[in-house]
Each structure stands twice: as C-alpha cells, then as structure tokens.
Image (cartoon, rainbow, N blue to C red):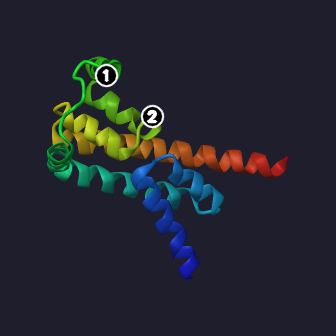
Amino acid sequence: MFSEVMKYIIVYLISMFKFVGGPAFGAAYNLNLVITACMTILGMMTSVIVISFYGQKLRKLIRAKYGSRQKLFTRRNRRIIKIWRGYGEFGVSFFTPVFFSPVIGTLLVTTLGGKRKRIFTYMLISAIFWAFALASLSDLLLDLLFRL
C-alpha cells in the first residue's frame, strides 16, 4: 500500500518541476492513465500557484543577493519577447509543459506582466491537454516497447 502511494507522490512531485516526467513515470510505474494525468495536473498547478504568489518576491530576493549583472538585450531575451508578442499569455502558457518547466513558464509569464487569473486559467487548460496527451503517448510507447 505504501509503495503504491509513493508512486503517485513521485509522479506529483516530478510534475511540479518537469511536467513531461510525470506521465513518463506514471507509465513506467504502470499507473492508471486518468490518475497519472490528474497527479500530473496537480503537480503543475501547485508550481503555478506557488510561483504566481511568490515569484516576484523570489526574483527580488535573488537579485538582491546576486545583483543584476545580466545584459538587458541578449539573444535569449529577444527570443522570449518575440514569443510573448507573437503568442501572448495563452501561447506561452500552452507550450510551458513541453518546452519549459512549470516553474520557468510561470516565472516567464509573471515577469512579462501576465494577470494571475489568466495565468491560472491558461496553465490549467494547458496542463489538462498535455497531461492526457503525454500520458496516453507514454502508455502507447511503453506498450510498443514491450511488444518488441
């Protein structure tokens, strides 16, 4: 019983920091697809909520400790602004689980001026879509792998 609960907790914790890991571990542990997706969604949304409320404070704390020695106009910063202008809050939120981690994506949207309510809504929509898509894909790939 304890080992089963630990599997779900691991999927949840991994999804807080790297979304793609949740469905992969869920498939590897042979967990139910729906429960794996739900634990993955909960993990991502926990990160989104924590970073949304404390992200700016954390950013100020880090800047106060380490200073602001970064260049303002870097290739990376220009690329981030181009994505933001092209796709907006929804686009960045939608691609967060696949290209970023929930923490990085939420910090990015928060830093660029996204509204908290929209961040929650868009990240939830994104998490639901990608959790079920990636959990299904992970199960399918694992089944194909074991049939070989």
| Residue 136, percent from left and from top | 59, 47
Camera-nearest residue between 136 and 61 = 61
Q: Which residue shows up at 58% across the image and 61% down it?
A: 32
Q: Amino acid at mark 2?
A: Phe
User: Which residue in the structure is indicated by mark 2?
Assistant: 99
Q: Which residue shows up at 57% across the image and 58% down it?
A: 26
Nearer the observer: mark 1 or 2; the answer is 2
Q: CA distance from mark 1 to mark 2?
A: 14 Å
Mark 1: few/some/many CA within 10 Å (<14, 14-19, 20+): some
Q: Is residue 18 left or right of residue 104?
A: right
Q: Is residue 90 left or right of residue 128?
A: left
Within the image, what quadrant is residue 109 found in? Answer: top left
Camera-nearest residue between 89 and 35 = 89
| Residue 44, percent from left and from top | 37, 51
Where disc 2 sits, the SS reads helix
Residue 22 in sight in this render: yes
Q: Amino acid at mark 1?
A: Tyr
Mark 2: few/some/many CA within 10 Å (<14, 14-19, 20+): some
143 shown above or below 39:
above
Q: Earlier in the sequence, mark 1 or mark 2?
A: 1
Residue 41 in sight in this render: no
| Residue 106, percent from left and from top | 28, 42
Image marks 1 and 2: residues in contact by CB distance under 8 Å:
no
For residue 102, which numbered disc appears in the image?
A: none
Instruction: Single out the residue that lies furthest toward the bottom.
Output: 1
User: Which residue in the structure is indicated by mark 1?
Assistant: 87
Within the image, what quadrant is residue 127 found in? Answer: top left
Q: Which residue shows up at 26% across the image and 30% down it?
A: 89
